[in-house]
């Protein structure tokens, strides 16, 4: 008699290699959970709200060239980053409406594109089990999962870097095939004419494939320039350079499309840079010199749109660990017999770096943190491109040593990714519910209450005035209902807001040294809303 299905579940399902059904189920939990969080979680201050405002302003104005927002009380063009992520967000706002979910769609699509690329390239060279494992490992990085659903530029940048590296992996594979076919086509005494012609034809085809992937590589570098700037070329170019250097692949450079490649590189980025320079002549100097050069060389340097966030030299190593820490739990360090096989100590590191797939993945994981260790201006999102490449490297190595078919490994993997899928969805939701009424960076509740208050007859024509200056999210949620002003002293805000609804953080009362002399209408979390001067007399 066969065992009861419930009794044999762990034995027959959880300890077997990852099935398509299990993979799609976990993938659906991850992605649907991320979509729900994108809709549910309000915009966070300051960066996400600021970028979301730029997307909304593009959609409302129809100006998809310049990202505009209110900074220091003035409507300014943001010249700190290229406009591609904001343009994508603006198009999304036209499709889904001007809401936080719409502004986050580009990052979500970029995340899905990366997952598809990881699946495709690992499946091509290591089979479907390795592909399943690589995708699930990538999703088990909490930082990757978070930034896959927020309005930031980092996930779009990551997609361009990852696909540039994938293109170069395919380029190197094609070059290897072209070299092998060319060598087999050489005349030999024992070689017949037909195989010679066939080999020569295959060599030509592989050479053409190498040219095609070379053009793709240039295209994704250009897309990176349109998404973030020159840093994309550095982050994608470093692993390529060291791969060519270590493996002495300089002869493969002849297969590159050096004439049409630069043209393809300029197609996605040059038009915007030219048009932006025509409308803002000071843009090239600020963007290329100040924003992308001086800021990383001079510690504590401030940019035009705020102070640079300085950490310390070498902090990129910590950021790398934090960005990928869940994947380190998948390392076979707790399986002593497998340690030697995993690191392949008998063959040495050369075998890892000589293969395009593992070599480029390993060098990306090494060179990107190494590059950001050279500056004190490194941030956690800069290390996100290492996540999918580290997942690929681990999945390929596990596949090569037979770990993916091990019952213990399969059980541990399935339980781990199931825990991450449920935890990454429920955890942020629970935290958001707990802090959205108290955290000063989640201001959506006070905006909703202000909009409801403004529906009353006595408040319809009353503007809203924020002490100090309005958060970026106020421009997104309240549109033109609030008074725009720059930073000012608290006493000045009190004097100039006499006829307005006054919104103040609870901390401002401590800065003022005394309670605000207005009638308190309501409090929402960290914010208080006061009536105008003399409201009691005029309201009647």
Image (spheres, rainbow, N blue to C red):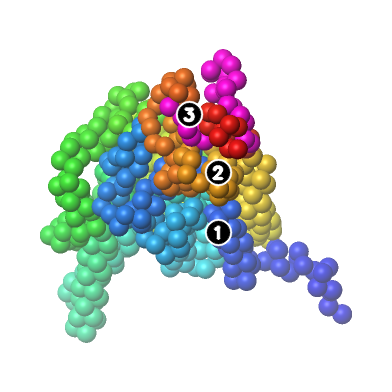
In the displayed structure image, the side of residue 3 where residue 182 appears, left or right:
left
* x then y, percent, for residue 495: 45, 23
Q: Which residue is mark 3?
A: 498
Circle 1 is placed at which residue position? 35
Bin the neighbour count of mark 1 within 10 Å (Cα to Cα): few under 14, some 14-19, many 20 and up.
some
Q: Which numbered disc, 1 or 3, marks the residue that appears first in the sequence?
A: 1
How far apart, in angstroms, are the residues tagged by discs 3 and 2?
16 Å
- What is the residue that sits farthest to the bottom in this orientation? 194
Q: Is residue 520 magenta?
A: yes
Extreme residue in the right direction: 1
Residue at screen point 32% across, 26% down: 302
Q: Is residue 477 magenta?
A: no
- Residue 511 at x, y = what percent? 53, 18
Q: Position of residue 484 (x, y in %)?
A: 39, 36
Q: Which numbered disc, 3 or 2, marks the residue that appears first in the sequence?
A: 2
Look at the image and tell me whether residue 353 can be seen.
no
**Vertical relation: 147 (above or below) 517:** below
Tell me the element at label 2. Answer: helix
């Amino acid at each position: 008699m066969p065992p009861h299905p419930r009794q044999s579940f762990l034995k027959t399902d959880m300890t077997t290699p990852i099935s398509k059904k299990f993979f799609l189920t976990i993938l659906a939990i991850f992605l649907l959970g991320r979509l729900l969080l994108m809709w549910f979680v309000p915009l966070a201050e300051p960066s996400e709200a600021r970028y979301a405002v730029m997307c909304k302003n593009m959609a409302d104005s129809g100006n998809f060239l310049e990202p505009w927002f209110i900074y220091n009380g003035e409507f300014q063009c943001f010249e700190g980053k290229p406009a591609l992520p904001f343009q994508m967000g603006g198009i999304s706002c036209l499709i889904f409406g001007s809401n936080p979910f719409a502004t986050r769609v580009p990052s979500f699509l970029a995340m899905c594109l990366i997952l598809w690329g990881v699946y495709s390239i690992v499946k091509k060279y290591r089979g479907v089990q390795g592909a399943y494992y690589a995708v699930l490992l990538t999703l088990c990085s909490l930082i990757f999962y978070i930034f896959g659903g927020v309005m930031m530029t980092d996930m779009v940048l990551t997609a361009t870097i990852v696909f540039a590296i994938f293109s170069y992996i395919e380029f190197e594979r094609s070059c290897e095939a072209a070299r092998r076919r060319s060598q087999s086509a050489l005349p030999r005494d024992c070689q017949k004419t037909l195989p010679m012609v066939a080999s020569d034809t295959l060599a030509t085809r592989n050479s053409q494939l190498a040219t095609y992937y070379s053009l793709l590589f240039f295209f994704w570098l250009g897309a990176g320039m349109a998404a973030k700037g020159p840093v994309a070329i550095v982050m994608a170019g470093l692993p390529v350079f060291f791969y060519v250097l270590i493996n002495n692949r300089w002869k493969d450079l002849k297969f590159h499309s050096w004439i049409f490649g630069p043209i393809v590189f300029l197609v996605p980025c040059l038009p915007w840079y030219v048009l932006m320079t025509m409308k803002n002549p000071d843009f090239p100097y600020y963007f290329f010199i100040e924003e992308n050069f001086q800021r990383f060389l001079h510690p504590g340097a401030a940019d035009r749109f705020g102070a640079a966030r300085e950490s310390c030299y070498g902090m990129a190593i910590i950021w790398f660990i934090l960005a990928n820490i869940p994947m380190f739990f998948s390392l076979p360090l707790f399986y002593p017999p497998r340690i030697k096989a995993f690191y392949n100590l008998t063959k040495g590191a050369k075998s890892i770096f000589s293969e395009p797939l593992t070599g480029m993945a390993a060098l990306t994981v090494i060179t990107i943190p190494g590059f950001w260790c050279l500056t004190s201006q490194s941030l956690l999102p800069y290390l996100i491109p290492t996540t999918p490449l580290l997942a690929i490297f681990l999945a390929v190595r596990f596949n090569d040593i037979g770990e993916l078919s091990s019952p213990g490994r399969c059980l541990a993997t399935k339980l781990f990714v199931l825990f991450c899928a449920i935890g990454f969805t429920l955890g942020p939701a629970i935290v958001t519910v707990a802090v959205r009424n108290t955290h000063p960076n989640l201001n959506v509740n006070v905006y909703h209450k202000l909009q409801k208050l403004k529906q009353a007859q006595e408040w319809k024509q009353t503007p809203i005035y924020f002490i100090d200056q309005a958060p970026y999210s106020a421009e997104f949620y309240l549109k033109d209902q609030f008074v725009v002003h720059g930073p000012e002293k608290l006493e000045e805000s009190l004097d100039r807001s006499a006829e307005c609804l006054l919104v103040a953080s609870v901390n401002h009362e401590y800065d003022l040294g005394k309670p605000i002399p207005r009638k308190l209408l309501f409090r929402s979390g960290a914010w208080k809303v006061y009536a105008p001067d003399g409201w009691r007399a005029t309201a009647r």
